[in-house]
Structure formats: structure tokens, C-alpha cells
Image (spheres, rainbow, N blue to C red):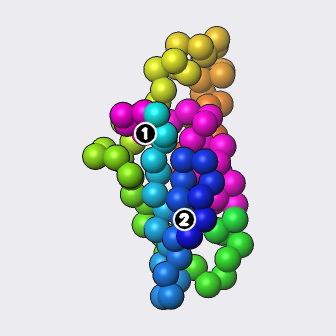
Amino acid sequence: MTQQSAITVEIDADGIGLVTIDQAGRAMNVLNPDLMTPFAAVVDRLEKEDAIKGLVLTSGKSTFIVGADIDQLTAIKSPEEAFRLCEDMKALLRR
């Protein structure tokens, strides 16, 4: 088992990975740089492991992810910035 920030990764003997998202100090997990930066690093690492056959994403909370961090959304300065953030998120989640 490895821990990277709010993300725990466990790989079983069959090559199935369990990725648990659990942001400390929050009642619910939210999409923000504090989560997405380490999540991207975990995805980068797991993509390179040939032994992994599949991944299960789960939450350490009673909900999975409630959505974008409102504080981050209100800090967006332009439509272009909002579009870039959405495209970056989409690209990461489709890997």
C-alpha cells in the first residue's frame, strides 16, 4: 500500500488496484489542485505498471467526490481559464 497525499493505492495479487480518495480535514472530497496534482502523479505511476489489470476508484468518505471546489471556481478569472481547467480534468480522467 502507498499513500500519496489524499490518495491511497493498494494493488492485490491479481493486479487489481484500489485507489482510495480521502482528503484530510474535509467532510467531503472536492476537485481542486490539492487532490488533482497527486491524483495525476498516481495515474502517471500506475500507467507504467504492466502488472495492473484494472483499477477501482473509491472514497474514504460517505460520498465519492462532490464536485469542484467552490473557492477555486470563484477564483477563475476568464472563460479561457475555466475551459482550460475543464479540459485538463477531462484529459486526466480519460486516461
Total of numbered circles in the picture?
Answer: 2
The quarter of the rendered structure image containing the C terminus is: bottom right
- Picture quarter with the N terminus: bottom right
- Residue type at mark 2 is Val
Magenta segment includes 43: yes
Residue 25 position within the rendered picture, expressed as x and y whole percent measured from the top left: 46, 34
The quadrant in which residue 86 appears is: top right
Apparent side of residue 48 relative to residue 11 in the rendered image (left or right): right
Residue at image position (48%, 26%) is: 69
**Range of the magenta residues?**
26-44
In this view, 55 is above or below 44: below
SS majority, magenta: helix
Q: Is residue 73 visible?
A: yes
Q: Does 4 sit above or below residue 88?
A: below
Q: Nearer the viewer, residue 80 or 38?
A: 38
- How crowded pointer 2 is (Cα within 10 Å; few <14, some 14-19, many 20+) is rated as some
What type is the residue that disc 1 sits on?
A: Asn
**Residue 29, label in figure:** 1
- Give the CA distance from mark 2 to mark 1: 16 Å
Q: In terms of depth relative to the viewer, which is nearer, 24 or 36?
A: 24
Residue at image coords 66%, 21%: 80
Check the image and report above or below for 93 versus 48. above
Q: Residue furthest front?
A: 25
Return the x and y of residue 7 as percentages of the image width and height.
54, 53
Closer-to-camera residue (79/71): 71
Q: Secondary structure at mark 2?
A: strand
Q: Is residue 44 left or right of residue 59?
A: right
* Residue 92 visible: no
Q: At 67% from the left edge and 77% from the top edge, which residue is drawn?
A: 49
Residue that badge 2 annotates:
9
